[in-house]
Image (cartoon, grey):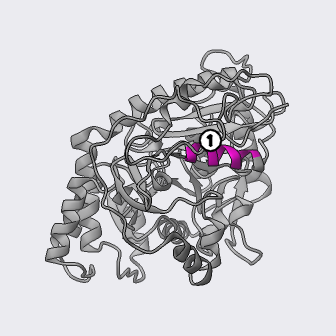
Amino acid sequence: MYKVLPCLSGRCAFLTGQQSRSWPTWAKLHLASGALCQKSAFKYPHTDLPEMPPCQFIPEEYKGMSKERMMEIRKQNCNPMTMKVTSYKNPVFIHQGHMQWLWDVDGRRYLDLFAGVATVSVGHCHPKVTAAAEQQLKKLWHTTNIYVYPTLHEYCEKLASYLPDPLKVVYLTNSGSEANDLAMLMARLHTGNYDIITFRGSYHGGSPQTMGLTSNAAYKYPIANGLGCTNTMCPDVFRGPWGGSHCRDSPVQTIRECSCAEGHCMANEHYIGQLKETFATSVPSRVAAFFGEPIQGVGGAVQYPKNYLKEAYKLVRERGGLCIADEVQTGFGRTGSHFWGFQGHDVVPDMVTMAKGIGNGFPMGAVVTTPEIAASFAKGVHFNTFGGNPVACAVASSVLDVIREEGTQQISLHVGTYLMTELAKLRDKYEIVGDVRGKGLMIGVEMVKDKASREPLPAEAMVEIFEDVKDMGVLIGKGGVYGQISEMQ
């Protein structure tokens, strides 16, 4: 039997009842300490934990609203969903950020390993990005694209230069949901078909239309939504029915046994067979599109067998459909090996949607597609008041500059590979660490009751782990259909 204590003592969060009281290596990185950091919140504090790396940045002293008053307003005036999604039993009251660090209103320092839900691509309040925003705010806050202004055109040209031909036409939006919603409309207009396929466990947005693409019960409402959207089996080589130890493009493979010959993946054949079954039973002979994240984000950093997307794209295109890569979480160098996640699969989609890291947290999204598809969409009038806002374009342009100048893609590759390799040692040591996976700084650690059953660790145990890691000064995320994935991005 596993056991999770209400503190990260010797058994830590990752342990069986038989483990000793020694700290795992990773935990030694995670105690927030120093003048601006909290005292240990553990019931059994340990004195042998080294401090986090020092930080020279000194946040402003917080003199604002009390925590009690904020919670009153949150309950009374913010929509009820705000309370529902509030992380932690004891919430974090964020005051200020600087690069990888966040400070709460009490001056406690946290290492942000969740990057604001895979959004902060170059660090909180990066000086160059902040300066770009300030400069543009002094010049022009807002105008729309019915006028010609330089920041819009400079950014569209720059963004398009990061994508392969023929992906050169840019539509700017304000969020990932809006980008995916627009991509659905464009695909249907261009192909003349209606049905769209996506993976089970996926999340592509919360608008009425993208809710159909989203295949996760937690984000569903009991109303008609997403007509024409069909999900197919996610080719998850850890939790799915097929998978082995050589399936995925990751520094760390699953511990499932694999008897495949070199260069031949039987799991991939089975999952492609499931997609063919979906085509044969659940959609018309002609489809509009296939949506897929290169690595499933909210689903828990799920990676597919090598060559799956390449074969899936071929099948979709044979049926008249477009292939759409949702790069909301995987884009902008986060996977390390490539700037875009789809490049790791050796495919070129017909459309790419993006948001989150595009503006380092500034509300922005985009769809990039081909001139041919764009021409089909031009038969009607599409107008977005805020899409391509001058401040958004200035911020996003600066983000691209910082990624290039500071080598953040390469940092994602090297730091992420090191972190996954170290996390894999915990998987080998502890029964409830079922899987470690990902690329670059898009990492998932799947927690299970035991490795044999691969059943998800119960929610109450995940909550304890989540809370304890926060109390140690590290913010991570939760993902997966059952909330059993610790995410680090």
Asked if the magenta segment contains residue 246, the reply would be no
- Vertically, is 152 above or below 121? below
Classified by dominant secondary structure, the portion drawn in magenta counts as: helix
Which residue is identified by label 1?
Answer: 42
- Vertically, is 320 above or below 315? below
On screen, residue 132 versus residue 96, left or right, reads left
Residue at image x 46%, y 36%?
Answer: 344
Residue at image x 29%, y 74%?
Answer: 389
Q: Which image quarter: residue 174?
A: bottom left
Identified by mark 1, the residue type is Phe
The number of numbered discs placed on residues in the rendered structure image is 1
Residue 148, percent across and down?
A: 18, 77
Residue at image x 44%, y 59%?
Answer: 106
Q: Locate the N terminus by quadrant.
A: top right
Residue 443, percent across and down?
A: 54, 38
Q: Which image quarter: residue 395?
A: bottom left
Q: Residues within 10 Å of mark 1 (few under 14, many from 20)?
A: some
Q: Of residues 121 and 155, which is closer to you in this image?
A: 121
Residue 265, percent across and down?
A: 66, 25
On screen, residue 162 versus residue 20, left or right, reads left
Q: Of residues 6 and 454, which is closer to you in this image?
A: 6
Residue at image x 46%, y 43%?
Answer: 341
Secondary structure of residue under mark 1: loop
Range covered by the magenta-colored residues: 461-471
Residue 225, percent across and down?
A: 69, 74
Q: Is residue 251 visible?
A: no
- Vertically, is 442 above or below 329? above
Q: Of residues 20 and 99, which is closer to you in this image?
A: 20
Asked if the magenta segment contains residue 463, the reply would be yes
